């Protein structure tokens, strides 16, 4: 299998990242952050979610955020939608792409969206049917694909079954998530070919968290299996509020550094992503975890002094 020459990077910071911040981030800050990310050339910026504000208070302002961001032509701005209520809220601000989300672990799905996996698929059936009829694009997430925070086993076959169910509903792209950052390359090399036998490779994305430092190793393994879409988060913001200890999405800077240095194109300006990360770090008042971001900031501080 040849590694892809070009990769699509899906930015998760404004949603997967910010939903994990304890302090409420002002709406204006979110809008400015998304606009900066858009300017970097990122082709996908997940903007917010339309879930229950009781479940995720941080993103209760999803409608205001979505309505105000500058929609750069050619950039996709998916929003997370858990049910028809969320779909209607998203449609009210003329969203063009939604993302539905379930998981490969029953226990996690129950905690996260209070449904069984089968119930979640049934809920999304109606959501995706409406979305397709309205001409929207749909992303589907399979969380906890490499392990669950609640200790239940997640065999690769379960991941494939859930991914295929989402593809059959009509999801255009399926993102396979290592929500708690436990996966290793040998698991990636086992899972991706199993998925690719059922779903075209170009519809598959991988979503790694760097909780145990294995995210880039997993990216490398996935590239070797022909995956060309990766989710990552500016500065490495993120985690999952329903997955204890699931710190840090793979940093967009880390991903871009690796890809560009390997000669794989993304069309994204790494310095502009750094500028967005620098902005949000200042607003949040804490350091970011991306190693490439941290190293490049330190290098620039030295050469400026
Ligand atoms: N937008 C806004 N409000 C919503 C909503 C939506 N999409 N879906 C449900 N609600 C409201 C209901 O109106 C109800 O409000 P009320 O208590 O004032 O009457 C309340 O939320 C509970 O609704 P219910 O349908 O009983 O949902 P639930 O309590 O079973 O929760 C979900 C199910 C899916 C709505 C909720 O668990 C959720 O939003 N989870 C998202 C978690 C998430 O985003 N995780 C991060 C991604 S990994
Ligand atoms: Zn995630």
Image (cartoon, rainbow, N blue to C red):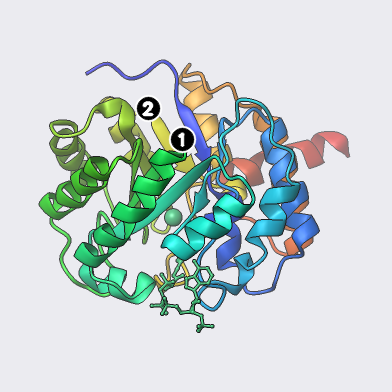
Question: Can the viewer see residue 49 in this picture?
Answer: no
Q: Residue at x 35, y 35 (%)?
A: 172
Q: Residue furthest right?
A: 305
Q: Which residue is mark 2?
A: 228
Left or right, 63 with respect to 172, comes to: right
User: Which is nearer the eye, 264 or 7?
Assistant: 7
Dot in front, 1 or 2: 1
Q: Residue at x 26, y 48 (%)?
A: 184
Relative to 305, residue 62 above or below = below
Q: Residue at x 48, y 65 (%)?
A: 85
User: Which is nearer the eye, 62 or 141?
Assistant: 62
Q: Residues within 10 Å of mark 1 (few under 14, many from 20)?
A: few
User: Which is nearer the eye, 289 or 166?
Assistant: 166
The quadrant in which the C terminus is found is top right
Left or right, 6 with respect to 202, comes to: right
Left or right, 57 with respect to 119, comes to: right
Occupied quadrant, residue 171: top left
Left or right, 238 with respect to 99, comes to: right
**Dot 2 lies on which element?**
loop
Percent x, y of residue 232 = 50, 44
Relative to 130, residue 261 above or below = above
**Dot 1 lies on which element?**
loop
Q: Which residue is mark 1?
A: 135
Percent x, y of residue 17 = 57, 57
Percent x, y of residue 70 = 74, 39
Q: Residue furthest bottom?
A: 54
Q: CA distance from mark 1 to mark 2?
A: 25 Å
Any atom of ligand 2 within 8 Å of the CB at mark 2?
A: no
Percent x, y of residue 225 = 24, 28
Relative to 285, residue 261 above or below = above
């Amino acid at each position: 299998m040849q590694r892809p020459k070009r990769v699509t990077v899906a930015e998760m910071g404004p949603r997967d990242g910010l939903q994990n911040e304890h302090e409420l981030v002002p709406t204006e800050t979110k809008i400015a952050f998304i606009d900066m990310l858009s300017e970097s050339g990122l082709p996908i910026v997940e903007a917010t979610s339309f879930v229950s504000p009781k479940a995720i208070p941080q993103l209760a302002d999803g409608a205001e955020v979505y309505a105000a961001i500058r929609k750069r032509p050619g950039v996709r701005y998916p929003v997370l939608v858990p049910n028809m209520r969320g779909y209607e809220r998203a449609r009210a601000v003329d969203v063009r792409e939604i993302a539905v989300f379930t998981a490969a672990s029953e226990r996690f799905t129950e905690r996260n969206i209070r449904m069984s996996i089968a119930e979640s698929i049934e809920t999304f059936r109606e959501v995706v049917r409406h979305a397709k009829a309205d001409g929207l694009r749909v992303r589907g997430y399979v969380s906890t694909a490499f392990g669950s925070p609640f200790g239940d086993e997640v065999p690769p076959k379960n991941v494939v079954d859930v991914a295929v169910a989402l593809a059959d509903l009509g999801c255009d792209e399926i993102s396979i998530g290592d929500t708690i950052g436990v996966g290793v390359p040998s698991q990636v090399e086992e899972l991706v070919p199993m998925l690719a036998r059922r779903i075209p490779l170009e519809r598959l994305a991988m979503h790694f968290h760097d909780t145990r430092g294995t995210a880039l190793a997993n990216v490398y393994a996935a590239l070797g299996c022909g995956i060309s879409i990766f989710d990552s988060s500016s500065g490495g913001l993120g985690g999952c509020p329903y997955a204890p200890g699931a710190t840090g999405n793979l940093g967009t800077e880390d991903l871009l550094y690796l890809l560009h240095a390997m000669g794989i194109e993304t069309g994204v300006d790494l310095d502009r992503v750094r500028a967005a990360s620098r902005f949000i770090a200042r607003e949040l008042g804490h350091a970011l975890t991306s190693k490439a971001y941290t190293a490049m900031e330190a290098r620039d501080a030295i050469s400026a002094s």
